[in-house]
């Protein structure tokens, strides 16, 4: 995956120092996944390649060339706190400007008890965020959704459908046409099956 990221970022025109920062961030995210204490059962778990896929969405779908955005995207993890680097590690790896993007990413509530106020706050946070923070947050959420059909918990799958329909798709419509198209497709083709109890 690292070679693929470097190739894609180089093709997008990311400079050598920027590439080094993106690779460093990706390695920090992967260190948690490769740790003997990782919550992942194997490297076949869809969450294993999540950091690289987020960067690829930014590069290929959104044509993002800002190394700060790409590095922050590599460390974005909204679903599993055990796979999220600490603020200390993030600050060390990212540098000041990318760290500011990472800390500005809104929290997505993928499971547990939530209410309409939670989703309202998330939507407000997304639509009022800086444009690059919006792109990172939605790219990260999109990759989570793309693999939600593999989640074992039906309640979490239903919650994914709800947050996609009520928050992420409406926010994506304001941010980027590719994101809008991809979220709307997911809501129609996948999310509705979760809402109505089909896997």
Image: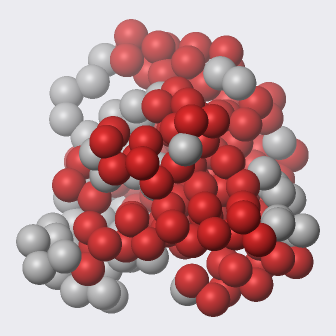
> In x, y percent, where is residue 39?
15, 68
Q: Is residue 143 visible?
A: no
Quadrant (top left/top right/bottom left/bottom right) for the C terminus: bottom left
**In the image: residue 176, left or right of residue 186:** right
Q: Is residue 3 visible?
A: yes
Where 134 sits versus 22, above or below? above
- The image quadrant that residue 82 belongs to is bottom left
- Closer to the camera, 45 or 64? 64
Q: Quadrant of residue 40?
A: bottom left
In the picture, the quarter occupied by the N terminus is bottom right
The residue at the point 16 percent across, 71 percent down is 38
Residue 75: x and y in percent read 46, 54
For image coordinates 70% across by 69% down, the residue present is: 19
Furthest-left residue in this view: 37
Find residue 85 and report its horizontal and vertical position in percent: 31, 52
Q: Quadrant of residue 83?
A: bottom left
- Compared with 110, 119 (above or below) is above
Report the front residue among 163 and 1: 1
x and y percentages locating residue 179 in the rendered image = 75, 49
Q: Residue at x 47, y 31 (%)?
A: 103
Q: Residue furthest top?
A: 117
The image shows residue 142, relative to residue 78, as above or below, that is below
């Amino acid at each position: 995956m690292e070679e693929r990221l470097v190739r894609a970022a180089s093709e997008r025109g990311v400079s050598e120092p920027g590439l080094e920062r993106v690779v460093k961030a990706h390695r920090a995210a992967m260190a948690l996944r490769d740790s003997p204490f990782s919550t992942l059962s194997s490297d076949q778990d869809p969450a294993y390649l999540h950091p690289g896929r987020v960067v690829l969405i930014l590069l290929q779908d959104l044509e993002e060339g800002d190394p700060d955005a790409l590095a922050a995207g590599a460390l974005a993890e909204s679903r599993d706190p055990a796979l999220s680097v600490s603020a200390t590690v993030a600050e060390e790896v990212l540098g000041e400007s990318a760290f500011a993007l990472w800390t500005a990413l809104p929290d997505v509530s993928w499971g547990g008890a939530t209410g309409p106020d939670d989703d309202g706050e998330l939507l407000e946070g997304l639509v009022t965020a800086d444009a690059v923070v919006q792109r990172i947050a939605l790219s990260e959420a999109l990759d989570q959704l793309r693999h939600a059909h593999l989640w074992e918990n039906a309640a979490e799958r239903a919650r994914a459908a709800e947050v996609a329909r009520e928050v992420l798709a409406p926010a994506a419509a304001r941010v980027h046409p590719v994101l809008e198209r991809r979220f709307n497709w997911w809501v129609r083709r996948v999310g509705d099956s979760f809402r109505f109890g089909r896997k």
